[in-house]
């Protein structure tokens, strides 16, 4: 399933890339000929999209590569890094467009509105079609960044058509730089969301969709678990999360935790994590301690650690459903 999905994704990205590059050339040439900053900023907007597509394409390729001894988590972060670099480039571009637009408001330039509208209309059709193709895959942060761009492009190109019409009827030249400012604002807004999300993943932050308190509570709710500490949750890629934690389990009266009981507690914790939070990659280390009921015993045994790390003697830990 993943492989065929990846292939389809790569095909869609290739088609999108070819179409976008053609459109960048067209908007740049006609934008200069029509003296329209809005069209030129569309060329910039679309160039950033083609960059997004190239980066996503590379990332999809990397993500599909298996883990190795040197890269034990595989290349899942490649897509995240791609989305980050791409969003930062976009923000720089938006700043350039905004500055040019402000400059134009003071020194107006005559724009050719008909050419502006014709080129923009072609753009709306193309961007709309690509956005539609990408919509199916927009769960991945990487593909989502391309999808958002395409959607943003479709909207901003539609605005350019409206602007062209307005200039045609009113002859107000400031409409063109005003539109450019609007496009710059849109680029900034969509990029900032991606920068925030990708930085959080790269800095090993707790995934935005998960609450550490909830995770700890549902682990502690498992019978036999006394305490959960040293809990870490982070993202490998945009939709795969990992967890590592120490779990203190109660020792029964006889002072020895049977292996079977250990295994069933671990399984219950893993099931809870998968069912509620979709966390499949877990590393859980058990520590045992005497519970309140063992007053009659001499001093409780030292904190004995029963690892559930890696591949354990009586059970694996990484059950992917």
Image (cartoon, rainbow, N blue to C red):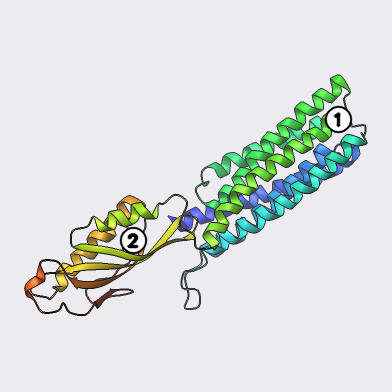
**Mark 1 or mark 2: which comes first in sequence?**
1
Name the spot of residue 186 as percent of width and height, x first: 68, 40
Residue 320's disc is: 2
Q: Quadrant of residue 43?
A: top right
Name the spot of residue 262 as percent of width and height, x first: 19, 69
Q: Which residue corresponds to the image point at 76% horizontal and 34% vertical from the top-left?
A: 120
Q: Quadrant of residue 271?
A: bottom left
Name the spot of residue 86 as percent of width and height, x first: 66, 55
Which quadrant: the C terminus?
Answer: bottom left
Q: Is residue 303 left or right of residue 280?
A: left
Q: Residue 49: tell me if it is visible.
A: yes
Q: Quadrant of residue 320?
A: bottom left
Judging from the image, what secondary structure is the residue with disc 2 in?
loop
Which quadrant: the N terminus?
Answer: bottom left
Judging from the image, what secondary structure is the residue with disc 1 in?
loop
Q: Residue 26: tell me if it is visible.
A: no
Q: Which residue corresponds to the image point at 49% horizontal and 48% vertical from the top-left?
A: 139
Viewer-proximal residue among 5 and 289:
289
Viewer-proximal residue among 47 and 233:
233
Q: Tell me the residue that label 1 is attached to.
A: 174
Q: Which residue corresponds to the image point at 44% horizontal and 58% vertical from the top-left?
A: 240
Q: Is residue 113 left or right of residue 196?
A: right
Cα separation, mark 1 vs mark 2, equals 58 Å
Q: Is residue 173 left or right of residue 253?
A: right
Name the spot of residue 215 as percent of width and height, x first: 34, 55
Q: Which residue corresponds to the image point at 81% horizontal and 38% vertical from the top-left?
A: 39
């Amino acid at each position: 399933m993943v492989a065929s999905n990846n292939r389809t994704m790569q095909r869609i990205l290739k088609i999108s890339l070819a179409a976008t590059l053609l459109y960048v050339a067209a908007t740049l040439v006609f934008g200069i000929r029509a003296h329209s900053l809005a069209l030129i900023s569309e060329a910039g907007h679309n160039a950033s999209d083609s960059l997004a597509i190239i980066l996503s394409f590379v990332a999809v390729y990397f993500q599909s590569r298996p883990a190795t001894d040197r890269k034990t988590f595989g290349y899942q972060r490649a897509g995240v890094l791609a989305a980050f670099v791409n969003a930062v480039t976009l923000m720089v571009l938006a700043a350039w467009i905004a500055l040019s637009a402000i400059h134009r408001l003071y020194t107006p330039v005559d724009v050719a509105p008909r050419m502006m509208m014709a080129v923009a209309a072609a753009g709306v059709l193309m961007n709309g079609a690509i956005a539609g193709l990408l919509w199916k895959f927009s769960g991945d942060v990487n593909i989502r960044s391309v999808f958002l761009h395409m959607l943003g492009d479709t909207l901003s190109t539609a605005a350019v058509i409206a602007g062209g019409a307005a200039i045609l009827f009113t002859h107000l030249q400031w409409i063109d730089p005003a539109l450019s400012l609007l496009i710059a604002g849109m680029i900034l807004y969509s990029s900032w969301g991606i920068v925030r999300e990708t930085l959080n993943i790269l800095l090993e932050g707790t995934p935005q969709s998960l609450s550490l308190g909830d995770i700890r509570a549902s682990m502690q709710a498992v019978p036999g678990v006394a305490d959960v500490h040293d809990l870490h949750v982070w993202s490998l890629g945009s939709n795969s999360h990992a967890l590592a934690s120490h779990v203190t389990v109660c020792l029964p009266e006889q002072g020895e935790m049977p292996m079977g009981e250990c295994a069933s507690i671990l399984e219950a914790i893993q099931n809870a994590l998968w069912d509620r939070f979709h966390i499949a990659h877990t590393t859980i280390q058990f520590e045992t301690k005497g519970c309140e009921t063992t007053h009659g015993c001499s001093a409780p045994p030292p904190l004995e650690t029963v690892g559930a790390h890696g591949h354990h003697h009586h059970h694996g830990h990484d059950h992917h459903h």
